[in-house]
Image: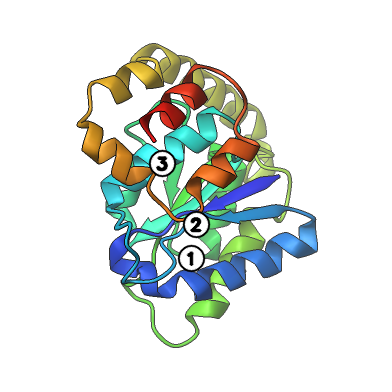
């Protein structure tokens, strides 16, 4: 599994702390982590929580990432932004129990964490426990176990509904402000990571064409 970490501007100073907690869990499981930043509060490329959605959608729809870890002060804005795009199912994850139940019941491909709200001492431990529970078992296995069949059935129905509800990603991008898009892809290491890991196709060509 390839995991992408995205930080928006209000919590960019915590990138190193979040990356360290995530990479420690990922390394133990044999996962890869790509850090798309922001890397510090004073980065030249300033990413808003709206732009985390634009960026995450590009990564997930091109398989440049299999899962996105992101968030903002409360996690709410990032979750809403990510869920505005096709191919993204983002859960709001405040604690390890949220992580476990979201993974097992909803089988999403992104989570938005409140990196400021209710976080102080022990935040690095809370993040570690969240990441451990997110990938503790095979996602989509169901919880409680007697609910596996209806939960998996409902997830398939949700996927079908979402497939009808969204336009192709490149159509959406074309209707957005080009400067908003370019800002979402302006991170220091975006072009090298995306060029290497994104699958060839219309979305990759469009995004790289913007740059």
In the rendered view, would you say 162 is above or below 71? above
User: Which numbered circle lies on residue 95?
Assistant: 1
User: Which numbered circle lies on residue 98?
Assistant: 2
How far apart are the two marked residues, 2 and 3, measured between alpha carbons? 24 Å
Discs 3, 1 touching: Cβ within 8 Å: no
Q: Quadrant of residue 81?
A: top left
The one of 177 and 15 positioned closer to us in this rendering: 177
Instruction: Pick whichever of labels 3 and 1 is earlier in the sequence.
Output: 3
Residue 4 appears left or right of 146: left
- Neighbor class of circle 1 (other Cα within 10 Å; few <14, some 14-19, many 20+) is some
Instruction: Pick whichever of labels 2 and 3 is earlier in the sequence.
Output: 3
Image spot of residue 172 (x, y percent): 30, 21
Q: Residue at x 36, y 47 (%)?
A: 52
User: Which numbered circle lies on residue 158?
Assistant: none
Q: Quadrant of residue 177?
A: top left
How far apart are the two marked residues, 1 and 2, measured between alpha carbons? 5 Å
Discs 1, 2 touching: Cβ within 8 Å: yes
Residue 40 appears left or right of 189: left
The one of 39 and 155 positioned closer to us in this rendering: 39
Which residue in the protein does label 3 denote? 55
In the rendered view, would you say 144 is above or below 147? below
Q: Residue at x 48, y 27 (%)?
A: 87
């Amino acid at each position: 599994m390839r995991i992408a970490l995205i930080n928006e501007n209000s919590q960019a100073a915590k990138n190193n702390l979040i990356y360290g907690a995530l990479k420690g869990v990922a390394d133990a499981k044999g996962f890869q982590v790509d850090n798309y930043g922001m890397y510090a509060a004073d980065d030249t490329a300033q990413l808003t929580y709206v732009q985390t959605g634009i960026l995450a959608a590009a990564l997930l729809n091109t398989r440049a990432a299999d899962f996105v870890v992101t968030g903002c002060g409360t996690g709410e804005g990032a979750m809403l932004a990510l869920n505005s795009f096709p191919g993204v199912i983002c859960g709001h994850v405040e604690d390890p129990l949220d992580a476990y139940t979201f993974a097992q019941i909803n089988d999403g491909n992104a989570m938005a964490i409140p990196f400021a709200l209710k976080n102080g001492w022990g935040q690095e431990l809370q993040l570690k426990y969240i990441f451990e529970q997110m990938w503790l078992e095979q996602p989509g296995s169901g919880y409680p176990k007697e609910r596996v069949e209806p939960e998996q059935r409902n997830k398939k129905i949700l996927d079908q509904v979402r497939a009808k509800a969204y336009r192709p990603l490149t159509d959406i991008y074309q209707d957005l402000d080009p400067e908003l898009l370019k800002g979402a892809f302006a991170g220091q290491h975006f072009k090298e990571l995306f060029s290497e890991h994104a699958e060839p196709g219309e979305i990759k060509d469009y995004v790289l064409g913007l740059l």
